Amino acid sequence: MLWAELDPYDRFRAAADAGFRQVEMLFPHELDANELERTLSQLGLEMVLFDPAAGDWKGGERGLMCLPDRDDEFLESVRSALVLAQRLGTRKINILSGIPDASTPDDVTHKTLLRNLRQSAELAAKSGVEVLVENINQVDVPGYWINTVDKAVSIIRAAGHSNIGLQLDQYHASMSGEDPVEALRQNFGLIAHVQIADAPGRHEPGTGSAPIQRFLAELDEAAYAGFVGLEYRPAGSTDEGLGWIKALGSPASA
């Protein structure tokens, strides 16, 4: 989402020039795998996380995991993601749950999601990759099934598989009316990855009213050892917008 005016490969170069050594992205399957691997290697970048294919994105789909009768397509997207993850050395994939059809009963959606989540966790475990579940607010994505941190945690616990972690997105928690700091405290043991953006607006920290500095301080106090993804849309240029991070001492993941 940073340096959005550049093509994806040049975004990686810009991230490296800005001092980042770890990156994440939504859908690397849309890129040429050879060129992607070569670019990351040449720039000394580690792809720490990405999202597998999420259905017809342009058509409004936001994941397949909870959609009945799409199981084969879903599992194929996971298998393809795991092949790419092994190639790139990525150890976490974030799987989007999706937006169920309004006519689908909630219990069917729930059972479908749990079945697919468990199967994907099992497949990923064999590849040494962890599956993540995240919360996405329904202001930005109406109808998204896992719309709060509480629901994401409930799903993870119901799935009952050790290879599933929580991707705690502070922005989506804020937009859902949850307290991201309290969500961090209550669910720290499940957190495998973190993303931040100010709210409202989804721009860099300091442009909204979300308690990002307190959130990051809480991560430090809890000895969080993972990465913090900067999943925001810069209000101006990306490079100018990165000024907020200098006070923290070192970059997060771009």
Image (cartoon, rainbow, N blue to C red):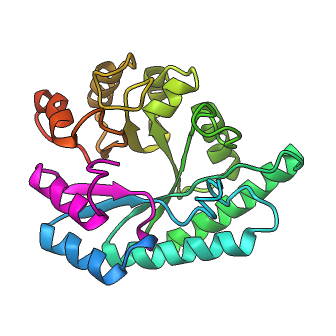
The quarter of the displayed image where residue 143 is located: top right
Front one among 41 and 203: 203
The answer to if 163 sits in the magenta stretch is no
Residue that lies at the very extreme toward the bottom in this rendered image: 34
- Picture residue at 23% right of the left edge, 43% below the top: 252
The spot of residue 178 in percent (x, y) is 55, 22
Residue that lies at the very extreme toward the top in this rendered image: 209
Front one among 135 and 198: 198
Is 34 located above or below residue 64 in the figure?
Answer: below
Q: Which residues are magenta?
A: 1-29
Front one among 83 and 38: 38
The spot of residue 122 in percent (x, y) is 60, 68
Query: Taking 40 as reference, is 152 left or right?
Result: right
The answer to if 6 sits in the magenta stretch is yes
- Picture residue at 74% right of the left edge, 69% below the top: 71
Is 103 located above or below residue 147 in the figure?
Answer: below
How many numbered marks are there?
0
The spot of residue 160 in percent (x, y) is 66, 52
Is 228 located above or below residue 125 in the figure?
Answer: above
The spot of residue 224 in percent (x, y) is 31, 38
Front one among 101 and 116: 101
- Picture residue at 44% right of the left edge, 58% below the top: 26
